[in-house]
Amino acid sequence: MASDTPSPAPPRRSPGRLSQLAGQSVIYGLGGTLARLAGVFLVPVYLAAAGTEAFGEAELVVSAVAVAAIALRLGIVNSMSRFTLAESPTGDWRPVIHTIYGFVLAASTTAAVVGLLARDQIADALQVSETLTVAGVAGLWIVMNYDVVARVYRIERRPKAFVAFQLANVAITVVLTIILVVVYDYGAVGLLVGNFAGTAVVFLAMLWARRRTVGVTRFERPLLGELLRYSIPLMPTNLAIWALNFADRLQVQRLASPAELGEYAAAAKVAAGMTLFLAAFQSAWTPFAHALRGEEGDEVAKQTYAEVFTFWSVVMGWGLVALTVASAPYIELTFPEGAREDAIPVVPLLATGVVLYGIYLIVNIGVTISKRTQWTPFIAGFAGAVTVGLNFLFIPAFGIVGAGITTVIGFALLAGLQWANARRMWRVDYEWSRVARIAVVAAVIVALSLWVVPVTGVLGLVGRAALVAVYPLGLLALRAVSRDDLRRIPGALRAARHRRGRRGEEDDAADVTP
């Protein structure tokens, strides 16, 4: 049906298109933002109701589900945008969507059957109960298929519907998890079932809403081969980055203790607040960078990329400071006894890993522009291998703080090596001197927060508020930013308000329910 075929918006001049991109990035990030905030504020509740060990077990299974989904999808879901949005406006996208959905449906169903048959072996490998394993296998099927349908909403540019479903997912998940964990005391099983059940309900609702677009009747085997040829080379990088993000959970469980795994997982939930600053940028950066280069040319693009990196560093540095300053009293006052001491210093370490991953995303633009990606899997694999290897030394010596240290080392290697790789192919002269001064200011304030300023009390409250406020003054003192830079902020805010006013009209035009 013609009405079912999404039509990309016609080309527009750079300012208009960037305004639309910025507005939709904010909308798309709303659901994820609320989900992360809910996760942060509910951690103490879950720790108290389920216990530290149960919380760690649940997070370990969630991590295992994440890596299994990456491996089983073979990167094919990420190819949906490339094989739809890049086609002509009159093209029919359903063969691509049906082929991807059919492949993922088959892969997830096969994995679920195998997982149920091998549940004893999987439970032994993860050192969790058989019931948790079954919940994880069911969650794997749900997550893999949900991701396909959610991606359809992105390529069809339906931000309002997408965010409505995200918010419903958060609400259902929170309510079910609290009922199962707090009221009925199901522990780790309740954490997992609540998490995946919310996604299952929303997945079915989204699938019904997009039933004319999502299906398997237009599955094409030749197209599947083309999709896999594009996506499979991306797998080593995805798996290596998973190692940087999640393998430390398994190593903490084995090299430290299940209780310390729970403490580490709780600290990671708090540190995930740092992704609030990264998520919208991650969605917007690559399209913005390529559009700018196509319209303005290489030299203007390179200069803009360097400026973006500098100001992005300012924002991320301030976010790191704010998160570190606020997380210490939050953990001290809300976490149960026995889950506090090491969690406080781990949070800024894991949050720094998020910042370094953001640097990797920025400097990687030189690789994507040159289309010479052959070294990226080796770089990511090397960084992941170093992290995993160092964990065998650092975790026994320093506990979960050691895992946080290796996370910083691993992501620093990933960002640094990819910058060197991109520089050989398409050089951008980033303002490293200014970025280094920004890093110094942020590091000094973080150190003061951890080792000098009291965690609680009136003195601690006043001192921590002062640390957040002094960050921009430190940047001015070290000339990391100038007064002219600060004068540009009101203009940027006015532009943002203007984009918000226009965004409603753009979203209403794009968000038409069939």
Image (spheres, grey):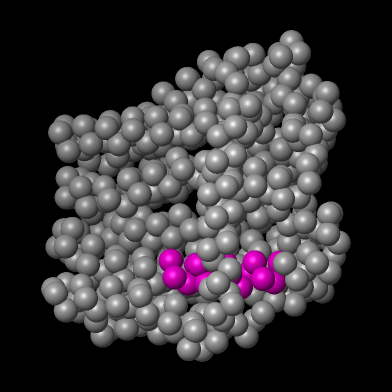
Position of 95 relative to 9 (above/below): above
Write down the quadrant of residue 502 in the picture: top right
At 27% across and 42% down in the image, what residue appears? 188
At 64% across and 66% down in the image, what residue appears? 308
Magenta span: chief secondary structure: helix
Residue 328, image x and y in percent?
26, 69
| Residue nearest the observer in this picture, 441 or 118 | 441
Q: Is residue 365 left or right of 455 when viewed as pictured?
A: right
Position of 392 relative to 237 (above/below): below
Is 313 within the magenta? yes
Q: Tell me the magenta residue range.
A: 305-319
Q: Is residue 76 visible?
A: no
Write down the quadrant of residue 307 in the picture: bottom right
At 50% across and 67% down in the image, what residue appears? 315
Is 257 within the magenta? no
At 55% across and 87% down in the image, what residue appears? 479
Position of 462 relative to 117 (above/below): below
| Residue nearest the observer in this picture, 441 or 252 | 441
Residue 371, image x and y in percent?
83, 57
> In what quadrant of the picture does the N terminus appear?
top right
Q: Is residue 380 left or right of 150 when viewed as pictured?
A: right
Question: How many discs mark residues in the rendered view?
Answer: 0
